[in-house]
Image: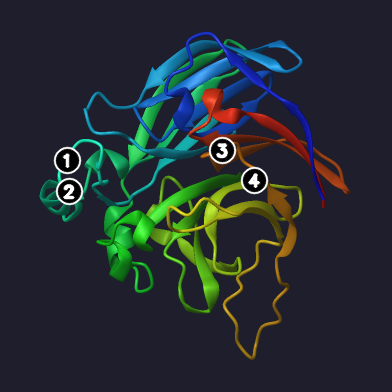
């Protein structure tokens, strides 16, 4: 069961407030990323359900978007990932005639700024962003025997699209919204920032949906899922033990546990989450939505 606890208000200068896609809590700070623009944003608590903007860190000066999809924190560092995806130009029936829209719809963009995994030092006690490093996973994606064929396909058409990120132990876990492969298997990469070529690829079955975000528990992971396409939902929460679900006669698989579905404001889509607290029986989460004012930030409680 998923229970809505409260709405969370963001105040001050909120950048790209309707495009928040990643969030992490670090001490008494909240850090947000958006899938438009180029910045991480830092907020501090002003009241129990109110956070105020303090500062931001620009990750790129280029005009093309960085398309940040997820943010997490461990060991003095923030990690943020771009989608590593291609996009098909959207139709604009409000602006163009059919002939122009047909031409526009044939264009598929590859923006280099989307192909970054960032590591940023962060001092929570002083509320200061530090040095930012980044790596590009594009070549690894292209060469991967399972994902490579999808690397030239637009993200919302079952092309490559990284949207989930969490830290567990010393490893970075990257969850893919797409591709969803045959047998409903969704790729998850496990890697070290300093040696990404030695990544491990495992799979999880979310009944046809892709990963929108991830959160690490003491034992296992919470997975936020949704459609690969632009469909308006549903958006579900699963409990996964973290083990590879690629089947074989030499493996016994523990299926993921469906914990429930999230509602969404009209026109909005569940995009990112962070773990606020956990017990053996419950977890409290902060969820953010795309296309919702101030990210539609909502505090939920879920029975595990």
Q: Distance between the residues labelled 3 and 2?
A: 26 Å
Disc 4 on helix, strand or loop?
A: strand
Q: Is residue 236 above or below residue 76?
A: below
Q: Mark 4 points at which residue?
A: 215
| Nearer-N-terminus badge (2/1) | 1
Q: Name the residue under label 1.
A: 96
Disc number placed over residue 266 in the picture, else none? 3
Badge 3 local density, few (<14 within 10 Å), some, or many (20+)? few
Label 1 Cα neighbours within 10 Å, binned few <14 / some 14-19 / many ≥20 = few
Q: Can residue 219 be seen in this view?
A: yes
In the image: residue 85, left or right of residue 298: left
Does the residue at mark 2 contact the one at mark 1 (Cβ under 8 Å)?
yes
Gap between marks 4 and 1 measured at Cα: 42 Å
- Local SS, label 1: loop
The residue nearer to you, when weighing 304 against 246, is: 304
List x then y, in percent, for residue 184. 53, 73
Label 3 – label 1 distance at C-alpha: 26 Å
Q: Circles 3 and 1: CB distance less than 8 Å? A: no
Residue in the picture at 38% in, 72% down:
146
Q: Nearer the viewer, mark 4 or mark 3?
A: 3
Percent from the top left, x then y, of residue 70?
50, 40
């Amino acid at each position: 069961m998923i229970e809505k606890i409260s709405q969370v208000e963001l105040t001050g200068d909120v950048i790209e407030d309707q495009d928040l896609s990643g969030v992490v809590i670090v001490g008494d700070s909240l850090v947000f990323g958006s899938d438009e623009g180029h910045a991480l944003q830092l907020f501090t608590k002003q009241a129990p359900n109110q956070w105020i903007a303090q500062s931001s860190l620009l990750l790129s000066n280029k005009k093309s978007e960085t398309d940040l999809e997820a943010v997490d924190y461990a060991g003095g560092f923030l990690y943020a990932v771009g989608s590593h995806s291609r996009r098909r130009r959207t139709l604009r029936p409000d602006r163009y005639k059919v002939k122009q829209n047909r031409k526009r719809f044939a264009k598929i963009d590859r923006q280099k700024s989307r192909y970054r995994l960032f590591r940023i030092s962060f001092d929570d006690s002083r509320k200061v962003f530090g040095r930012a490093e980044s790596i590009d996973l594009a070549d690894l994606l292209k060469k991967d025997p399972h994902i490579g064929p999808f690397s030239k396909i637009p993200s919302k058409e079952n092309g490559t699209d990284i949207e989930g990120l969490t830290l567990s132990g010393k490893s970075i876990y990257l969850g893919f919204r797409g591709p969803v492969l045959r047998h409903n298997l969704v790729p998850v990469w496990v890697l070290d920032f300093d040696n990404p070529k030695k990544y491990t690829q495992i799979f999880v079955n979310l009944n046809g949906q892709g990963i929108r975000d991830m959160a690490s528990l003491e034992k296992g992971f919470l997975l936020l899922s949704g459609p690969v396409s632009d469909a308006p939902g549903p958006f579900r929460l699963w409990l996964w033990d973290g083990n590879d679900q690629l089947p074989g006669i030499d493996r016994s698989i523990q299926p993921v546990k469906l914990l429930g579905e999230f509602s969404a404001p009209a026109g909005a889509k569940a995009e990112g989450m962070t773990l606020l607290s956990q017990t053996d029986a419950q977890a409290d989460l902060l969820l953010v939505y795309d296309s919702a004012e101030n990210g539609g930030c909502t505090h939920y409680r879920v029975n595990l």
